[in-house]
Image (tube, grey):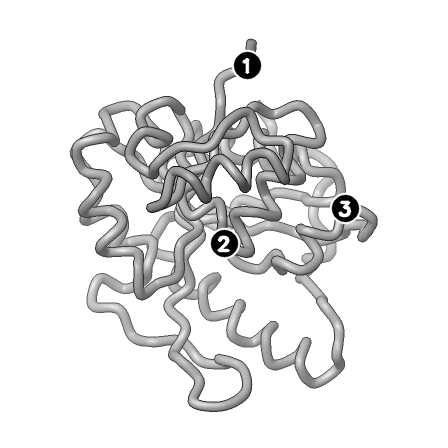
Amino acid sequence: MADPVAIIGGTGNIGFGLAMRWSRVGVPVIIGSRDAGRAREAAQRTGAQEGRENADAAREAPIVVLTVPFRSQSETLTNLKGALREGQILVDCTVPLAAAVSGRATRTLGVWQGSAAQQAAEMAPDGVRVVAALHTVGAPTLADLDAPLDEDVLICGDRKADKREVAALIARIEGLRPVDAGRLEQARIVESITALLIGVNARYKTHSGIRLTGLPADLWPE
């Protein structure tokens, strides 16, 4: 049996949609939540393998996907320090969006470390490698299994092998094309694209993603 993927914050919009999409194509998913009961309920609804409390979910998977809001990122990673271990890949999907008083959040906050992904790397235990990805894929489209996906996913990280592994997982979702966007420090640029997309989508009342043109057919050569 293939190794499971743990989705921390899997009862939220992005995590829930990823769980649905990966479960649909046979990827074993463990949904993590602060509330184990909610995690089990979400697992039943998405077809995930099981639902557990966040730390228990993180212990079980070589790839852990963090999908919590930025305001919860620090607390969640602090609570996961005893669960994450050397050799795991932590996929950080966090976007440091500024809270909107009214309407939608269309700007990002400054992060001391440079980006939410770099903050995650600073907080993660030694030996846990952070890859930033999945910032620009919309939750409504992910959760609608009848909605076709046709967009790129920009991946940032400091080790090519880690990015390749995350790319293979993302490519399991039909219509998502993983693209190597450089080192982890580039995540600050990718995270800001999310705020731009929120504004564009609100303006045109749609759920657009991003697509890069002119790329070669083989984006992940050996």
Type of amino acid under label 1: Ala
| Quadrant (top left/top right/bottom left/bottom right) for the N terminus | top right
Asked if the residue under mark 3 is in contact with the one under mark 2, i.e. CB atoms within 8 Å, the reply is no
Residue 145's label in the rendered image is 3
Report the residue at 32% width, 62% height from top: 115
* Circle 1 or circle 3, nearest the eye: 3
Q: Name the residue under label 1.
A: 2
Name, please, the residue furthest toward the top. Answer: 1
Q: Quadrant of residue 189?
A: bottom left
Q: In terms of image quadrants, where is residue 219? A: top right
Determine whether the residue tagged by mark 2 lies in a helix, strand or loop.
loop
Q: Which residue extends farthest front?
A: 37
**In terms of sequence position, does the residue under pointer 1 or pointer 2 come before the other?**
1
Q: Distance between the residues labelled 2 and 3?
A: 16 Å
Question: Residue, x 28% and y 54% (percent of image)?
Answer: 118
How far across and how far down the image is residue 88, in percent?
32, 27
Q: In this view, does 146 lie above or below 44?
A: below
Q: How far apart are marks 1 and 3 (CA)?
A: 23 Å
Three-letter code for the amino acid on which mark 2 is drawn = Gly
Residue 192 in view here? yes
Local secondary structure at mark 1: loop
Q: Where is residue 117 in the image (x, y as percent from the top left)?
A: 34, 53
Answer few, some or many: residues within 10 Å of disc 1's Cα (few below 14, many 20 plus, some between 14 and 19).
Answer: few
Where does residue 77 sit, x and y in percent of width and height? Answer: 24, 47
Q: Report the residue marked by disc 2.
A: 12
